[in-house]
Amino acid sequence: MHNNKQHKQCVSFVFALISDYLGGFSMDYGFVDCHCHVSACEFEEDLEDVIQRSRQVGVKTLVAVTEEVGEFDRVLQLQERYPDLVAPCLGVHPLQAGGGSEQRSVKLQDLDAALPMFYKHRERLVAIGEIGLDFTPWCAPTEQDRHDQMSVFIKQLNVAKELDLPVNVHSRSAAKVTIATMREQGISRALLHNFAGKPSVALEGVKAGYFFSFPPAVCRNRQRDKLIKQIPLEHICLETDSPALGLDKHVRNEPSNIVLCCQRIADVKGLSPQTVQLVTAQNAYRLFPGAKTHTHKTV
């Protein structure tokens, strides 16, 4: 891991790189980061600087997701602190913290404390998320693990339907079953974040009206190019998934890096970055109408 001085140097370098791109972007319409973890502990020490850099590159909305109930209060506090920027989602991720740095598959009891919070804060939420399935073998090695994940996922999908909210979804090693489950459950509004399934599976999601988002990490992984090419721009959003999935996997990612994935999608599709910026922002507000309502109230 980089020490603090090296980290600051890396941030400065990447931000300088981003600044070179900005001449071609519309600062008026701005970017929407559809999936980020601004409540993460990695941002505690310099959150104000992170927010400032995101505003400087033209980020207008941060759709802030949670992974466990312990984060719920923090993300709601951030909305109070930055009401024109942070649009909160509450959700329980398919992987939960285990002992030390280990992760374990989610259990139904992990949802117990979350369920009343969804209803208590329903007017403040723009989506239920981050929810979904993660069938990576070392994360969900048993049939029981996968069954428990599915139970938790379906319960949260039902909450989203009841509250008339979209869902912000994780689908690692489970793309096909995630999309199939949402369709079976009657979900019509969903974002599949950092999607890495087959293009044919993605197109099933497109048929269902779902959206797909890609983080800056796609700049270092050309395997996703075919997928990005085949998904219509009208079904693509931008995300950072910060603090993870940045340009350099050893350096903390942050919302200002959204410029990089915008540029990458533009390059892959042979479009101008301005077009990608505009269409993806329109897509984001269509999918998360509450994000526009909440964050633009004070603008």
Image: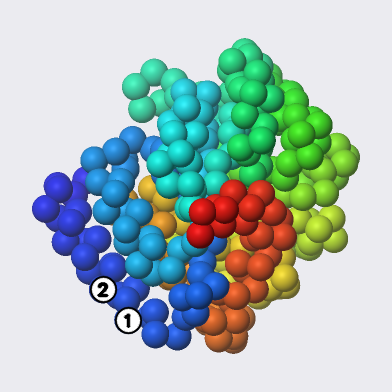
Disc 2 residue type (three-letter):
Ala
Quadrant of res 34 = bottom right
Task: Report whether residue 169 is seen.
Answer: no
The residue that mark 2 highlights is 16
Instruction: Name the spot of residue 98 as percent of width and height, x first.
Output: 44, 20
Q: Secondary structure at mark 1?
A: helix
Query: Pointer 1: residues within 10 angstroms few (<14), some, or many (20+)?
Result: few
Q: In the image, is residue 78 above or below residue 284?
A: above
The numbered mark at residue 250 is none
Residue identifier under label 1: 20
Q: Is residue 52 above or below residue 56?
A: above
Q: Amino acid at mark 1?
A: Asp
Q: Nearer the viewer, residue 157 or 165?
A: 165
Mark 2 residue element = helix
Q: Are marks 2 and 1 in contact (CB under 8 Å)?
A: yes
Residue 82: x percent and y percent?
Answer: 43, 47
- Between 196 and 137, the one lying in front of the other is 196
Residue 94 pos. (x, y %): 60, 31
User: Which residue is the extreme one toward the front?
Assistant: 298
